[in-house]
Each structure stands twice: as C-alpha cells, then as structure tokens.
Image (cartoon, rainbow, N blue to C red):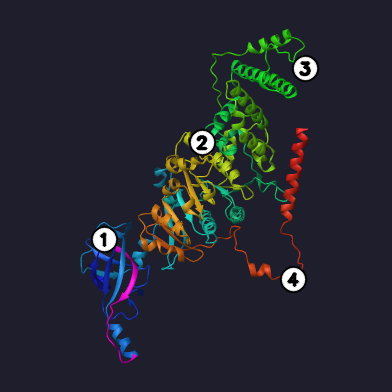
Amino acid sequence: MTKEDKQRVIGKVVAINSNRFSVELLSGFENFNVSGFDDIHYFAQLNSYVIVPYQNYYLVSEVSEVREKDLNVPFSNPKEQILSKIQTGKFLEVIPIGTINNENFDFGVSVYPTLYSDVLYIKEAELDIIFKTNKTVEISCQNTEECQKDNCQCKNRQISLPIGRASIFPDYDVKIDIDKFFGSHSAVLGNTGSGKSCTIASMLQTLYKYTDYSATGSTFIFFDVNGEYQQAFSKLSENNSDIEVKNFTIDDIPETINGQVEKFVLPHWFLNIDEWALLLQASERTQLPILRNALGFTQSPSQEALQHIYACSIMYVFEHWESPVAKRQRIISLLESSKFNPAIDFSKFDAKFGNFPNQNEEDKFKNAVRNFIKEDIAIDPMYNAEKFHFEDLGKALETAILYEEYHGNKQIRDYCSSLLTRYKSVQNRPDFRFLTQNIVTVNQSDYLMQFLGISECKKKSQIIIIDLNSANDEMIEAVSCVLSRMIFEKLRAAKDRNKFPVNLVLEEAHRYISTDSGRVFGDANRIFERIAKEGRKYGMFLLISSQRPSELSRTVLSQCSNFIVHRIQNPEDLSHIRQITPHISETILKRLPSIPTQHALIFGHAVNLPTTFKVNTADPKPKSDNNEISKNWFREKEFAINVFAEIRVNKNLNRAAKEEDNNDNL
C-alpha cells in the first residue's frame, strides 16, 4: 500500500461472510467525512463506495448499512451523551461489487479481503475509472495507411453514451457502452408514469446530438402503441440534418398533416399461415387445416388439382344441399371459378322444382363433373404469399369446407363457423382496411426497405415510428408480428450477415409478448422469442418497454442483457425481476419501490456496475404527460371544449371509407 493510501484509511475489516463484510471505522469521525488533499470525502452515505487494497488491485464495495455499537450506558445529561457517541464504535456494512486493476474496472469479485484489511475512502480518479469518464470516443478509420499521412481524415466515433447523472455522485455522468447496450437485448421497466418513454426518448435524443460523425447507420423501429414518440423526435432533423425520422399511422390522415405522416398499409398476402391463424383465431385441430387449404387455393395450384377440388365441391352441393335456389347459386359460382374446359352446362337445372327436365340431362351433368374427379390425385395446396384479393379468401374457405364435406366430414361446417364469422368481421371492419384493402402490387423487398430507412440503395432514415395508438391488441399483434418476422428473415438472408443492425422498440410490450395462456393461437408472436434467442447473430435487437414485467414472455425477458428499472411497487413484478436477474443483490432490488420519478436503476453488461441515476430530461418530451387534474377541474362554467375535434374528423373519414366499400360491393 502506498503512502497516499495509508493517509486515506478510514477503518478496518472486522467481519467477513459470503456476500458482504463489516468495517469498523477509526475513532474521531464525528460527521463521517475526512478532508483529503483534493476535497472533503463523505464515506458513510448509503450507496456510496469504499475500496480495500488487496495484492495489486483494489476491491470496490458499496455501503449498504451504517450503524454504531450499542453502549447501554446511562447518561446524566445530553452533552455527555453526544461526547460519548463521538467516541463510540461505528460500523459500515459493505457489499463487494468489483475490482480496479491497471486503471480498469471489472464488475464482480472472486477473492475477498483478509481480516483487519485497511479500508479507504474512494477518490475522484477511481470514480472516473468506475464511471468511464475517460473513455467516450475512439478513432474510426477505414484506411490505416492514410493515418500515417498528414491529410488523415479520421473521425472520432462515440463508444459510450451519457444517459443521466449518478444519484449519489451528481458530478458524474452515467454512461452506457453503446456496443453492449444497443448490440444486445435490453428492457426498460417501471410503473405507469415513472418515466419509461422519457428515458428512451432522452437516450436517442442524446445519441443524435453528435453532428460531427452522426449515427446515420442506426435503425430504430418503434411500435408506438400510445402515440408518444412523434412529438419526442419532431426536432431531431432540425438539430441534426444527417438524421431523418419517418412517421406512419394506421389512422386516416387529415390533410393538415398529410406529407408529414404516411399511411401504414400491410398487404394481407405478406402474412404467413401462423399469422393468419392469429388474425382469424383459428383453432389448431379443425380450423387450421381448413385455413391452410383455403390459403393454398388462393395461390396457383395445378389446373388438374384445382378442377378436381371444384368438381368434388360441386358434386357435394348437388347431392346434399336441400334448397334448390341455394344449390343452383352455389354450383354456378363454383363453375365460374373453376373455368372447366370443356365447360359444364348447368343452365337446364330448374331452381323452382330442384331437378333437371329429365334423367338424361342429370346424368349428362353428373358425368361431365365426375370426369374432373381424380381419386388418386395428391392434393397439397401450398401457400406462397403471392398476391390475392382479400375476398378471394372467403370463396376459398367455402371451397375448402365443401371439399372436406365431400370426403365425409359432415360436421366441419359447424366446427368452422367461428372462423367464417371472424373472417367476415375482419373483412367488413373499417379499422382493418390497412390490411384488407387490395392495394397495387408491391414487392415485399421494396416494402421492407421503407421500414429499414433505405431508399434507392442509400440509408436515409434512422427512426421509423409506426403509430398504433388507435389499434386494439389484435391489430397490434398482427402488425408487430408480421413486420418483425419479415425484417428478421430479411436480415438472415443478407449477403453480409450482421452488418446492418436493427433495433425494435416495443412499447407496452406486455400487450403482444405476453405469457397469457388464454390466447387462442400463440405461434405467431413467438417470432419475438426467436429474435430474442437468435437475433444477435443477424443484428436484430429488442428494446422492451413495459409496466408489467411479470406478464412478459419469460423467454424474451431472460435474454435481455441490460435493464433500466424505474419505480416498481407491484410485488409480483418485483418477484419476477428477482427471478430473472439472480446476479443482482437483494439490496439493489429493495430500492425499486422508492425510486423517484425521472430516476432509474441501471444494471447489465452495458454499465460497469448497478447504478441509480437521474435520467437526462427529454426535450421535447413524449406525449405522455400526467394529467393536471386540479387545473382541468376548476374552470369557468360551460367552458368551450375542442379536445375531440380531431376524433370527429377521423370518424367522418372512417364513415366515408365504409360508404366507399359499400359502393364497391354494389
């Protein structure tokens, strides 16, 4: 131990156990501070640090408890008691958290100090090492030969990002390692109103303030279920011209904002079978096989197979349907769809009496249809995600049910009644027009480029916001699952793997990455579990924001390497965090219920050690302010209200869209 170290000894280690040790302070420290060469040092504050020299490194420990030895001596007057307490023994309970060696801090301790080891107060130079104030940028150069010349154009790129100020050391910025935070899955958790969206907005606002060498290669895709982030990032492009923000919404766009916000559409033929099952809530045993066949019928099966299917369906309707009128209408519809060659004549069937004029005409019709039935044909309709009209799926579902009935399953129509009802509901609902409308053919690759911020093979946008504020949970699930799955598949197939990082920001993630066992079909939203487990290999990362961690998928949450936790008071959520973060001490987790607003606890691979900090203020803030009840309550009588003007406009637009659909059907 150096001479300087000896001058800053404050106590001795007097007890050691498996996860902490006790320190008895030297006598004479009345106010738990000591004057050093550089400053006055307070060493007995909760959550502050002390260090213990051991061999060639220092053990860094956090103060978790301060106490004094009980004297059990009666005092005759208060002054005598005060003087005696100054002289009594004082103790610190400290938890070892890491080591400092060669000006590097490493989290975790494998060797404990010996009994009666000296304990020192911590200096600013050591705090600098812990908080990495000396490592914020590194030189970025693509050509090492140029570096040796006078005209080198090397630039400094950020390797750490300040996100707030340490609560116990307000002069120190809390920094995250950019590679370890945004290059792995992370979670921002906390009760409603604790500041989660402000934390995310503040982090990205800080990231994009660096204009000399901007983070133009970043891609953040927000599933903004509360409509908060358009306001938060509205000034990014003004402050940094290198950065572009794109806004999409599923709502009808008023003319006042047209051009600033784009209408979000999701072609329905982009959905895979699992996602169709999620959308239509198809049960796995009976409805899913019918849905699978129907989707295959919307594509381009072989002509022979298609004619066989229609012929079987026609024969079933002709032989089993009782209503002559319904029978005639259905068979004519099937004949028009089948395009049999040679054509089959059904015009002589009498819908009034339900028969042909004679037996010869009936036999002629039956034989013509049966000529297209191939009993040994293999029917395996494949769904290739090729374009089809949404109403074609309804016809295909009916055909698939008829084909199943022809083969003896007489109850299949009853089993699939809820599937057909669900399909008709989605088809007729105006809020699903972003999915059901028959838009101009769009290439899936070109469609994805806009959400990856790429235009004409150049990176243009860095933040892409999809406003899902007016969407219900089933719509949010459909949009988030389909788009995430398509992007994941795109990155997996990329020529240069893991060279184009994409960060998905999942707001209110418990709404669509839930452990809810009551879900009708959960395979589609398992894409997030797959991204959580495999996304790192391809450069796809999740940033999860939720107020109910106990309702989140355990698989997704267990893959998160970093946590920013705001105030959490629910016992179930606290217990869940304890289970998924076993390396975090009980002392740290006990802070969570009492963390004030705009403060958070951060821990994980991106920071040196768990730290409580005050989050940098977001400017502008997301649209998530608390309601000022007293201000909104106490008003003059019959004051004017214009809060709902925009909603009336949107309702009118929805009504007009519905009338347009009805006109198209007519």
* Residue 523: % across, % down: 50, 38
Q: How far apart are the alpha carbons under marks 4 and 2?
A: 57 Å
Identify the element where label 3 is drawn.
loop
User: Is label 3 in contact with label 1 (beta carbons under 8 Å)?
Assistant: no
Tag of residue 18: 1
Q: Nearer the viewer, mark 4 or mark 3?
A: 3
Identify the element where label 1 is drawn.
loop
Up/down of 209 relative to 539, above or below: below
Up/down of 118 relative to 251, above or below: below
Q: Nearer the viewer, residue 362 or 21?
A: 362
Identify the element where label 2 is drawn.
helix
Q: Is residue 453 visible?
A: no
Q: Residue at x 74, y 55 (%)?
A: 645
Q: Nearer the viewer, residue 297 or 459?
A: 297
Which of the 4 quarters of the picture holds residue 449?
A: top right
Is 629 placed left or right of 540 in the picture? right
Which three-letter amino acid code belongs to the residue tagged 2?
A: Lys
Q: Residue at x 20, y 65 (%)?
A: 114
Residue beneath disc 4: 636
Residue beneath disc 3: 350
In the rendered image, which quarter contains the N terminus? Answer: bottom left
Residue farthest bottom in this picture: 76
Q: Nearer the viewer, mark 3 or mark 1?
A: 3
Query: In the rendered structure, does residue 71 fall within the stretch colored magenta?
Result: yes
> What is the span of residues highlighted in magenta in the rendered image?
59-77
* Residue 392: % across, % down: 66, 28
Query: In the rendered structure, does residue 114 fall within the stretch colored magenta?
Result: no
